[in-house]
Image: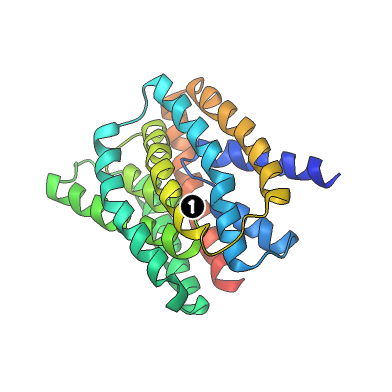
Amino acid sequence: MTILILLLLGFVVGTLVTAMGGGGAAIYLGILTAFFHLTPHSAAATSLVTAFLPLLIGAYAYYRQGNIQFNIGSRMLAIALPAVIIGSLIAPSIPELIYRVIIAGILILLGIQILYRTSKPSTTQKSPRGRRLLMVAFGIISGLMVGIGGLSGGGPIVASLLLMGLDTLQATATSSYVLVGMTFVGILFHISTGAVDWSAGLNLMIGAMIGAFCSPILLGRLNPARLNAIMRPTMGIALVIMGGLSLIS
């Protein structure tokens, strides 16, 4: 029964987070700590390992559809990877409470900004300088989330891509590509400080891989305008909720 529950949870998480351009490591982290009571280091390592293959499958499916914006994604990845390394190195010296407050504040602010832009869409495009600043800021934030907490960092990446003017499908696809590289580097650092619990992680991973494979196919069949209308506010609300939960947990 436990195996079946893990498979179903993995499938649901893999489908939803791939549809929203995330990696799901934060959700896996919550499942592993709340239900399996893993230590923080072990949960972080297991969550990143669990998220990696589903991310890879989702990114490949988006690549086959031609939705990944490699130019933007590669530049963001180049910015984020050093932040992953730095975050991994400083993580042991950051108090958990301070880290939780910082991450919660980031998520809430990102969610509010997306909701505001959804309700009052801008008629002007950001300048090239403004887009570069967005890319640098959110790339660093996302990289630190991966390095410090074993999170996948998908929220800031998708938010920044949406704010830069990409439509929802392009943002989710490009985010998946960026997160593959970030998660891989995060695994290299976190796996050295915490043992992976394969008994829990493997079953979550299998379910998530199936969900990640199905998600891009489902998204590709939806109307882009309707998808934007649904996913943008959904992402904004989800970020605010996740930030609030991080703050009070």
Tell me the residue at 45%/62% (across/down).
108
Secondary structure at badge 1 equals: helix
Tell me the residue at 45%/27% (across/down).
60
Where does residue 37 sit, x and y in percent of width and height? 72, 65
- Quadrant of the image for the N terminus? top right
Direction from residue 8 to residue 155 in the image, left or right:
left
Where does residue 68 sit, x and y in percent of width and height? 35, 30
Which residue ends up furthest to the right in the rendered image? 1
Count residues near mark 1 (Cα–Cα under 10 Å), then give few for <14, some for 14-19, many for 20+.
Answer: many
Q: Which residue is mark 1?
A: 187
Q: Which picture quadrant has residue 140?
A: bottom left
Q: Is residue 152 visible?
A: no
Where does residue 130 sit, x and y in percent of width and height? 17, 51
Direction from residue 58 to residue 197 in the image, left or right:
right
- Above or below, 140 relative to 127: below
- Above or below, 27 relative to 228: below
Q: Is residue 217 visible?
A: yes
Q: Number of callouts in the render?
A: 1
Direction from residue 146 to residue 1 in the image, left or right:
right
Q: Front-most of 187 and 172?
A: 187
Tell me the residue at 47%/46% (across/down).
233
Q: Front-most of 56 and 138?
A: 56
